[in-house]
Each structure stands twice: as structure tokens, then as C-alpha cells.
Amino acid sequence: PLGQIEELCWVCVPRMQITDASGSPVYKVHPPTCVGGMCVDICAEGNPCCGKGCCKVPFYIYPATQADTDNGAPYVGKVVKVPKSLAVEFFTDAEAYDIVFPADATSAQKAMIAGGAVFINANFFEQESQESG
């Protein structure tokens, strides 16, 4: 195995940790925060009210050794759900993500981050019908 993506205990801001094959933490992943880390900063990728950054949902990647990852702390990479065009929204169920890998990430770490994008999509953006048996 390359490692794992673990969802940590959270209340308002979803937090994950990426570990390597030996179980050592490599990266912390969560959306940008404000109000002392208590809320997701919905304007981090632009103001959603004026069109710039509208509907972008970022998850920032921080080194596991970085103590402060809240309130605009510097990040080393990101996974951003990209808004769909109206036509794509109506005719497909496809999602698109922009991934910015940390500059020093190994190929195994990049694979774990790409897997993290799938994990984020499955847990936070895919809505399974309650009616399906």
C-alpha cells in the first residue's frame, strides 16, 4: 500500500490526514478556515457573490509538521472542486477538480493526494438517493 487517507474527528470543518505506507503522517488536508478555525472560509478562492471563484470548494494541503493550519495559514498544495458550466450541470454527473501538488511531493504522495480528491468527492459532494434499496 502507498498509505492511507484518514478522516479525523471534526465538528464544523472537515479534516483529513494523509499518511505514508508506514503510517507516518505526511499531510493535513482541510478547507480554508476563518473565525479561529471554527468555520469554512467560503471566500478563500474568490468572492462567491460576484462571480470570481463562485462555487469553488478548496481543500488545502499542509505539511503534517505544520502546527497552525487555520485562518489563512500558508499551504503547500490544494484540491479545488471546479464549478461546472450550465450545460455540463444539466447533462452530466461529472465533477472536475484542480489539484496543485506540493513541490516536494513524491509520486506515491501525489497518488495519495489524487486519491484524496476522490475521497473528498465521495464524502462531501456525491449524494446517493435515499430511495435506492
Image (cartoon, grey):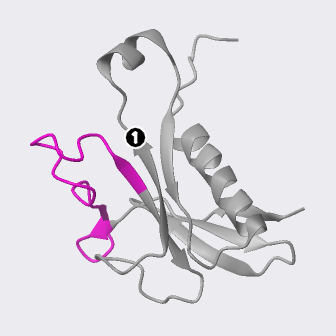
Horizontal placement of 13 versus 51: left or right?
A: right
Quadrant in which the N terminus appears: bottom right
- Near-viewer residue (111 or 20): 111
Q: Provide the residue span drawn in magenta.
A: 33-58
Rendered residue at 26%/61% (across/down):
44
Residue 123, how many percent across, how many down?
57, 42
Residue with the mark numbered 1? 82
Residue 61, how many percent across, how many down?
51, 69
- Residue 39 highlighted magenta (yes or no): yes
**Relative height, residue 59 to residue 24 (above, below):** above
Q: Amino acid at mark 1?
A: Val
- Residue 32 highlighted magenta (yes or no): no
Rendered residue at 29%/40% (across/down):
55
Callout 1: 10 Å neighbours few (<14), some, many (20+)?
A: some
Rendered residue at 65%/53% (across/down):
114
Horizontal placement of 32 versus 118: left or right?
A: left
Q: Residue 5's image quarter?
A: bottom right
Outermost right residue: 1
Residue 112, how many percent across, how many down?
71, 60
* Label 1 element class: strand
**Relative height, residue 7 to residue 98 (above, below):** below
**Relative height, residue 6 to residue 94 (above, below):** below
Quadrant in which the C terminus appears: top right
